[in-house]
Image (cartoon, rainbow, N blue to C red):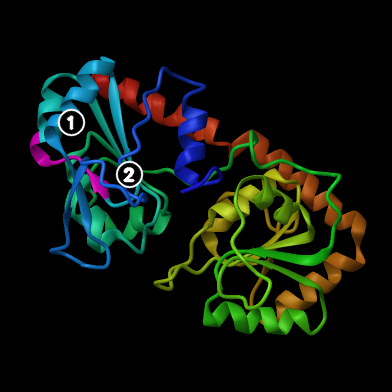
Amino acid sequence: MGDNDVVCLMARDLAALCDLVTIDTGLYSSENYGWFEVDASLNPQRPIHWLDHDRVIAAVNDARADFIIVNSGGMSLRPETAEKLRSAGVATVGISLSDPDVYQDHGIAYAHLYDLYYSNSMYSLKQQYPKNLKVRWLPFAASPSLHRPMPQVPKTYDVVIVGHARPERIQVVNSLKRYFSVGLFGSGWGYGSSAVHGEEHVRAINSGRIYLSFSATVAGYMNVKVGLLEAAACRTCLITKAFAEVEKFFRSGMEIYLYKDTDDLVASVRHCLSSPYVRDWLAENSYARFLSDHTWESRWNGVIHDVRQCKLG
């Protein structure tokens, strides 16, 4: 879905680590490439896209593949496809990037088919997926090949937000706008705001002194969003709502600001803006942490290790 799409960046960085054949099934295209059948029996709003058995087997055979990854989009191998690949010694890997929200419609239906299955959500891992499944945590990351510091971009805004508007977000933003200049990038924010992609997306992040990441999902779960890692990759001071999982990524008060409520957010932003040295220090710390721990390359190295272990039995 564009050149800053998560799946696109993941594939680009995996290609640097192994021989990779990437297949676009056309899920987000207006054309039907014939790669899948839509199954809306569980939820018409979030259908499963079962991949065509013959086309998958032919693609794997043509590539002489060691493993196959089905990444997001509500797509899955069919049970008979997963079994045939397993019998041929091809490891099967499934990835969900939208848990916990999609578990009841997607993960519950097909996670058990895979040799290795990964969820972006620690909550899903602990509270949703059955313990007998080989489900592992694959947190979000970012790619320094795209998201990077741009010193030449003016810091136009006190706070930058990249994401779509929702009622609870609008309420917070209105509170911030009473005191600070706020850059809004995404749909639904009103006149002059729009979604940004590629280099424009990177410039948007770099245009703020502080990057605010909203952690609540559409379904109301708390989750570390990919935008937080992308902002860290741009060496921007980070702030998000306090919850346990975020501190697995960044240390509070040393690499990120965490707030409890809107009043606390306003106070934290004010303190950050009044202390440029502290703001820059936090940004440098989170950037260093990103480079060491949170690139897609580092995530993929872990997956490749798991695949090797899986193939060894």
Image-quadrant location for residue 104: bottom left
Q: Which label belongs to residue 55?
A: 1
> Judging from the image, what secondary structure is the residue with disc 2 in?
loop
Q: Name, please, the residue furthest toward the left.
A: 80
Q: Nearer the viewer, residue 245 or 138?
A: 138
Q: Which of 259 and 205 is in front in this view?
A: 205
**Which residue is rendered at x = 81% and y = 65% of the image?**
157
Based on the picture, tell me whether residue 79 belongs to the magenta stretch: yes
Specify the amino acid type for callout 2.
Gly
Residue 132 visible in image: no
Image-quadrant location for residue 227: bottom right
Q: Magenta region: which residues?
A: 75-80
**Structural distance between the alpha carbons of marks 1 and 2:** 14 Å
Specify the amino acid type for callout 1.
Arg
Q: Name, please, the residue furthest toward the front.
A: 31
Image-quadrant location for residue 41: bottom left
**Which residue is rendered at x = 57% and y = 57% of the image?**
246
**Image marks 1 and 2: residues in contact by CB distance under 8 Å:** no
Q: Is residue 73 left or right of residue 40?
A: right
Up/down of 47 relative to 271, above or below: above
Q: Quarter of the image containing the C terminus?
A: top left
**Which residue is rendered at x = 69% and y = 58% of the image?**
252
Up/down of 134 relative to 221, above or below: above
Query: At which x and y percent is residue 175?
Result: 71, 84
Up/down of 15 relative to 232, above or below: above
In the picture of the structure, the residue carrying the numbered disc 2 is 26
